[in-house]
Structures are given as C-alpha cells and as structure tokens.
Image (spheres, rainbow, N blue to C red):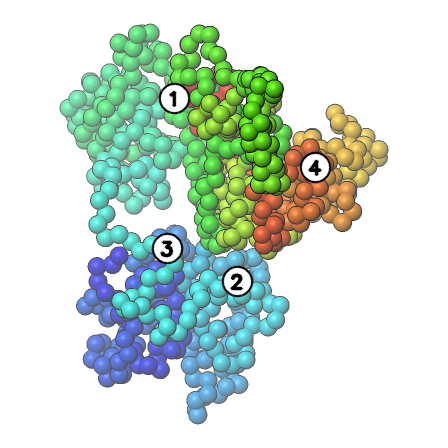
Amino acid sequence: MTSATLILKGTAEELERPHAQKVIAAAKYANVPLSCETVTAEECASISPLAKSLVLCYGDVPVTTSNAMMRTIATLSPASSLLGTSAAEDATIDGWLSFIWTSIDLPLSVAGDELGDNAAVEQDVAKALDTIEKYLTESKRAYMVGNSLSLADISLAVSLSLASLPSAKPSEGSVLGEYLSSITPKLDTPSASSIITPSGGIMLNGPCPPVDNKLYRRHRIRIKELLANGGKDYIDQTVTVAGWARTTRNANKGQLLFVELNDGSIGESLQCVLDAEKVENLEECKACGGTGASFQLVGTIIASPGEGQAVELAVSAAKLLGAVYGGDVEGNTVGGKLYPMSKKAHTLEYMREHAHLRPRGRIHSAAMRIRHAMAYATHTFFHNNGFLYIHTPILTGADCEGAGEQFGVTTLLGSDHLQKDVTLPVIEPPPEEDPEKLSKKELKRRAKAAEKAKVTEDPTKPVEEKVVGAVDYSKDFFGKRVNLTVSGQLNVETHACALSDVYTFGPTFRAENSHTGRHLAEFWMIEPEICFADLADDINLAEDYLKYCVKFALENCADDLEFFETSPHGEEGLRDRLKNVLDNPFVRLTYTQAIEVLQKAVAEDGVKFEEEPVWGIDLPSEHERYLCEKVYKKPVVLTDYPKDIKAFYMKLNEDEKTVAAADILVPKIGEIIGGSQREHRLDVLKKRCEEMGLDPRQVWWYLDLRRYGTVPHAGFGLGFERLILFITGLQNIRDVIPFPRYPQNAEF
C-alpha cells in the first residue's frame, strides 16, 4: 500500500469526462487506492495554478495532466506492468499516450462547441483511428505495447468508449473494433461515483500494490544486471559480486589471478582480475582448487583491454567462500583432480550421472532459466486471460487415461526398505457358518438387513468388491488403493463446471516402460479447461498459448537461445524455427486427411515409414514429424481422431466413428498438445465408458457433472518438459528436467 493518500479532485462535470475516467480506470486495474472528491474550479486552481478543473493530489504533490496522473498511478504498482516491462516499452507507451491526447482527446474535446468545426474533428479522429487500425493489423498485437494491458490501452479504450461522435466508433468487423471488445471488459470501469468505497478508496481485483517496507535485498549485484547493456551502466562503479569460478588462470609470474565468475543468473561469466598489489590474500585465492571454487569479490568495473568481454572487475577485496576439495578421494586435499565438473567438455550422459553438480554446467543452467521463463509465461498467460489456477491432487484413486500405467502409493510395506519377510494383508474368506445353527430370529434379521441394503443401494455408485486373496487395502493408510496421478484433468473439470475457465499445472506420473528421449516417468502437465466452449475454441486457446510461450522465450531468453543455437548439443537455426511458429497460422486438418497425405507420400513419393499409415492407428512420432517438418513445415493441428484410440471422455462426433479431439504437432517434437471437447451428454458418456471397458460407477462423480447442470466444455494438456525441449532444441528430455530420475540417480 502507498503511504501517501491519492485523491482525484475535480468538478462534478470533469470527473465524468474521459480525462478523469482514464485515471480511475488505471487505479482500478492497478489496485491502487484512490479517492474522488468533487471541488470547484477555483479550488483546483488554488491547489495548482496549472490545474483548471482536475488535479491528482499525491501527498503534497499535485499532478495536473491525465497522462501524468496515470503514470503516477502506474509507478505505484509496478506489478501491474502498466508502463511495460522495459524502458523501450515505457517510451513506446508514452508515445501512444501523446498521440491519443493530441489526435483523439483534443479534437473530441471541442466537438459540439459553438466555435468548433465538427466536420474537421471527425476528419482528424477518423485519420487517427486509421493509423491505429493499420498498426494493430500489421503488428498483429493483442495490446498496443508488449504482452499485457498498459496505459496506452486504457487511454484509448476510455477515450473511444466515452466519445459521442459516430466517427470515433470503430467500424464493425474492424481489427480496432475487435481489439476494443477484448480490452474493454478488462477495464469494466463504472462511473466515478459508483466505485468509491465507504472507506474512500478503490480496492478491487487486480495486481497488488507495492509494499513500502522492502526488507529483502541482495548484498551483491547479479552478473546478469551487471553485464546488461555491455556493462556500460556500471563503468567506474564499485560493486560486490559472488559466484563460482568457471576457470582460474595465473599470469604475470603469479602476480595476477584471472577468475571467470558465474552466479547462474546468466550464461556469460564476468572476468575478475586479482592483483597481488591490491588483494592481500591472493595466495589463498590462488590455492582455491580451480574450477568450482566460490568467491565473494569487491572491485571496480572497468573497460576490458582484452578480447571476449566488454568489461571486467578490477578486484580490491576477495573472500574465498569455498575451495574445491578434489585432490583426493576422501576430499581432504584442495585440488580439482577429482572434481566431476572440471572445465573440460563433458557429454550430456556424463552430466546426468552427476545430477547434483550439473546445474553448474552451461547447458543445464540455460535449460533451467528457460524452464523458469516458460513456467512464468504459463501463469502470466492464463492469469491475463482470466483463468483460475487450481491445485489438483497428486494422490488419487482416479485413472484419467484408463491405461493402468499408475504408480501405487502404500504404507503396507513399512518404512524400512531392508525389512525381511514383509507380509501384506489379504482379504480373507468369510467364516463358514452352519445355517441350521442360526436362530430364526438371526435369520430373519439378516434377511431384513439384506433387503434394506438393496433399497438403500445407490445404483450410480460403485459396489465395494472383495476378492479373496487380493491385497486388503482397507488396512492401508487411506483405507483403499491410492495412486500417483496420471493427469489432473478429471479433477480440474469439477472446478471448470463452476468457475468457467481454470487450469492446473503440476506433476504427473506414468509407469510407462518407454525409455525414449521424449518420455518420462515423472513430468509436469499444463491442463486448462474452458466452459461454454467447443473444440474450435480449445484449438484457438492452445495456439495462442503456444505462440505466447515462444514469443516470451524469444524476447526474454535471447542470450540462452543464442547459446543453444551455437552449442553442439543444441540446434542450428533454432530461433528461425521458433519465429516460424509465430509468423504462421497453424495448419488444421482432420486425422482422415492426414492419413491420406501420408498414404500419398508412400504411394507417389516413395517415402518409407516403419509403420504403415492406415486409418485407425495411433500416429507414431515419425508420421507426426513428417507432416509438420516435411509436408507443411510448420505446426499442424489434427482433429477428429478415431474414437477407439482416444479416451472415454472425448465428445463423440455425429459420424459416431470419430471424436472431437485435437493434437498439435510441432517440428522436432511431434505431438506437444493433446486436447478435446469433453463429452457433456450423460447418456453418451455412459455408453462410451462401457465401450472402453470402464464401469460408469467408478467415475460416478464425473458423471454427476453431466447430471447436474451440464455444459459444453473443452480442454487440453501440454507436457511441460516437451515444451522446454521444443524451445531449447535439445535432443533428450532428461536434459531439461532438474533431476534425471531413472535409471540412475534414483536417490533424487
């Protein structure tokens, strides 16, 4: 919260005009507390001679123009990103604010005046709208600047929504019209009088305002910030850095020590020069053990006289935090002889065998930075589009895919994995009884109890099945069999059918016996679910999301993408492949059409596949990659798959042979997204369960969603690690996860 009170003072007429409404909309979106107070024009002038009939009071500081007022509010809530996420975006937003003020607001302000020329006004405004229409059309932007709503969007939306001239209204079907229809609901700004809370402030949904008492701060500068802009911003400044040595080198007969220091914030390292004349403990630093040793260094940033780096650190004080004890097997001698992550090149297989140290390597650290960026982009995309993040259970009794490839979770084995002769409890046969020895009263009681059970039995719920000799899970922690989740989809649908648009992002587990470079036993899934939507809506959401992630990576992970493109482990032309995803709409065709394309490739072009493309098969990776890499050379969306190879919950099409499913195929990976419209018709869903060998009573709660207020809905799933593989260009999916889990390093 801000320590000073924000009060927007103005005449009653002015508070209802666009200038004031823009300020109110910005405050509401940024969740910055704002009070409105009606005053006279004379009172405004007494606050500031520059104020005519509107002024924003921020403590003792009066702000007099609407653009300056909006900027003041935006600076109080940096989390809202109303001024963009970079200096360049800030400058672009400022330019648009000036354009909207001079080309739209000023002309409209004189419309209707006795001396005003409405024809000239309409001509000026129409010209301005044409400029914006052309900009939005050519740039294909969802927002005026950047990837989220900014002051430019607020200013334009409010100006046009409150304009009275017909010329200020975008034509039907125009790009500007569609833009405003998507932007305006995000503002949802009522009149000034209706948004003032009893406490005199606006406290509505939106980004949190900043916290004044910032307690946490680093006692060092990250190398990423230091090397930004070529290090020019820190020339001749004294800084403190800390990190791990990638290399160390003695020079000038031992009087100099060069340390390539990296702290993980960026792939590049900072060259640090330790001079015996300036650093008292140089000998201690020289005896650090080399690569892998950790330091805290204080010094001055200077222009580097050598090649390969623009700046370097002239160290004045050094502290050796941790030497490398790799001189002997016991780890008692300083030296790098046995340090697993020496500066020589290592294979990725070798790196996986030393998973606890591989984050220090450039490949893995770059992959983790991109992994972080994609997780952040995922949450940002769905949050900005009005989705709620739902945490679905990891321990569950549901099997979403029905494949039986689940990991069981039990306490029946005890906590000691070395315990011998473990005996699992099993279901025992009921004790034998002689009916002749039972009294008539007991027989009558049992018959009555059995009759009552039939009456009270719910035909929609599963009947507890006890098989003699099977493991008795009633003795287990949960009282029944529980597994690690294979998907959060079924669970998240329960919330979609009440909250409309939701998503889950969490770990999933598949006991698949597939040791390929694209499969994992444990991986993360992103699964959005949208209500009141069909398959086309689902595909549009998936394409938007994937393109958002690619664009985010290109704009925010440029250094790491460049590294992967030039690395022998990466992919040549990586960035061009990613840009191709952005520059082209995804190809959309049915599964049947795809089979015809593949069959034609075999018959006419002589293409050879390991598996023959025939209708009804689950397309292998070679078919998927051929379509998007050889035929169309861009992402492909396949729809309407045969029902027999898809899950029970996918909506049955009218032909009753296919389902409303869609897979997105991308070059290098093949399938990266799989989704469908869900079957919302109760009778059809029950029939599909039976066809797939699933007892409908086992998913009674899932059927209840169709029984009580069913709605059309759809969703998709994306394997997060496959997304990282796609973005980085790496070959093996185990190189984009924090820990390689099998077959080695099982302790992780």
Image check: 159 left or right of 515? Answer: left
Give the CA separation, mark 2 to mark 1: 47 Å
N-terminal of the pair, mark 4 or mark 1, is: 1
Residue found at x 75% / y 27%: 611
The numbered disc on residue 357 is 1
Looking at the image, tell me whether mark 1 or mark 3 is earlier in sequence order: 3
Please tell me whether mark 3 or mark 4 is closer to you in this view. Answer: 4
Kind of residue at disc 1 = Leu
Q: Horizontal and vertical percent for residue 225?
A: 32, 41
Q: Is residue 179 above or below residue 742?
A: below
Q: Earlier in the sequence, mark 3 or mark 2?
A: 2
Of the residues shown, which amino acid type is indicated by label 4?
Answer: Glu
Regarding mark 3 in the picture, which secondary structure is present there?
A: loop
- Residue 633 occupies quadrant: top right
Q: Amino acid at mark 2?
A: Ser
**Camera sees residue 543:** no
- Tag 4 secondary structure: helix
* Circle nearer the N terminus (4, 2): 2
Inspect the image, locate mark 3, and give the three-letter code of the amino acid beneath it.
Answer: Pro
**Residue on which the image places disc 3:** 207
Residue ID at (58%, 61%): 137
